[in-house]
Amino acid sequence: MIYLDYNASTPVDPAVREAMLPYLDRYYGNPSSGHVLGKHERGAVETARAQVADLLGASPSEIVFTSGGTESNNHVIKGVAFAPRDRGNHIIVSKVEHPSVLNPCRFLERQRFEVSYVDVDSTGRVDPQAIIEEIRPTTILISVMHANNEVGTLQPIAEIAEIAREAGVWLHTDAAQSCGKIETRVDRLGVDFLTIAGHKVYAPQGIGALYIRNGIKIEPLNHGAGHQSGRRSGTEPVALIVALGAAAELAARRTNDEARLRTLRDRLHDALTGALGDDAVRLGNPQAGLPNTLSMGFRGRMAGDLLAACPDLCASPGAACHSGKHEPSAVLAAMNVPEEIALGAIRFSVGRSTTEAEIDSAARMVVAAVRKS
């Protein structure tokens, strides 16, 4: 098996697994308990909070642990909307956001909130001027992802942050795909909220984090006994939190990953385009994109058919099949990618364990599948 789907989920790093194991058997106390075992668990949670904060250039008090990226995004969108503020009811998002941003916005529209969905260019990138044109006196939040999960395009978050600050509007960025691959320091991005998903940074599935800038109060998504300073109720899953902390510390130390991932990505791109020519079209922004992500549209082909012909290759198609009808993804549709290319789009994403030999083998598989189709 050749795994080129790291944007979907990463394996748990061995060092992360070792860090969490004691909290699955030896340390099992409730971190809210006052006894010695509970205090030990509490210390582990706070250590992990500091590790995540260090990766983001934040204060530990600004980190809230969640169940993952979807919960973090829902927490921000709904939490800002229902915060006890009288400023307004308008939210701005891009058309290429993850469904965990877009669908909460659609829910809020049914609650009489107003949402502006900003267009992107042919590479999936937002024009900051388009954000300016959508801001109203009633705007309470702007949410633009740091990096697109399908095509890898990076957004000009720091520039959008300046616009948001000048307008007095909070800014959220979903950094689930970028965290651990490129720098995601909140002090440089200038955001008020930032989302992390553990299973994108070599931690287990089911854990994530949300950065909330100090001084900002929003409505909790989970109401209960007031855990995590009242921001997210629910007994903390210590083993998973420890794992995320270890993964964050590991990511902060791996300073050479970006160049290696980019080399592997480009090797795959060159192999595919060299063999297939105009039948292989690169999607996304090659100058401003994630170092590990390559989205390719294979002209006149169906992505599902190509992947079915490569049973030993794990990658993600860019088209969905509903009731027997194939449709381009919402991201590719927003980018106005022609259907003959969008229906054949496949996302390849490399990771820490990917080798050059795997890249070369994957390229041969895909080229053979395209030529036979």
Image (cartoon, helix red, strand yellow):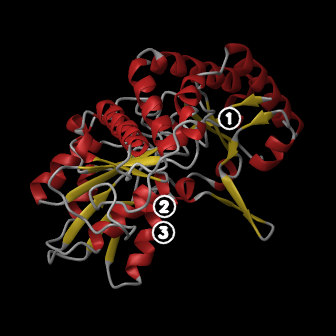
Give percent across and percent down for residue 23: 53, 38
Say which label, 2 or 1, has the lower sequence index. 2
Residue ID at (78%, 33%): 313
Residue 103's label in the rendered image is 3
* Amino acid type, residue under disc 3 in the picture: Asn
The kind of residue tagged 1 is: Ala
Residue at coordinates 23% horizontally, 51% vertically from top-left? 192
Q: Are marks 2 and 1 in contact (CB under 8 Å)?
A: no
Residue 280, labelled with which disc? Answer: 1
Identify which amino acid the numbered label 2 is placed on: Ser
Say if mark 2 contacts mark 3, CB within 8 Å: yes
Q: Secondary structure at mark 2?
A: helix
The residue located at (75%, 47%) in the rendering is: 303
Q: What is the x, y in percent for residue 121?
A: 41, 50
Q: Any mark on residue 100, and which?
A: 2
Q: Residue at x 68, y 34 (%)?
A: 280
Q: Is residue 150 above or below residue 13?
A: below
Give the CA separation, mark 2 to mark 3.
Answer: 6 Å
Under circle 1, the secondary element is strand
Q: Nearer the viewer, residue 341 or 144?
A: 144
Give the structural element (helix, strand or loop) at label 3: helix
Q: Is the N terminus in the top left, top right, bottom left or bottom right quadrant? A: top right
Q: Is residue 25 above or below residue 67?
A: above
Residue 118 visible in image = no
Query: Callout 2: 10 Å neighbours few (<14), some, many (20+)?
Result: some
Between the C-alphas of marks 2 and 1, the distance is: 30 Å
**Camera-side mark, 2 or 1:** 2
Are there few (<14), some (14-19), or many (20+) residues within 10 Å of tag 1?
many
Sequence-first disc among 1 and 3: 3
Q: Where is residue 146? Give x, y as percent.
A: 38, 44
Q: Nearer the viewer, mark 1 or mark 3?
A: 3
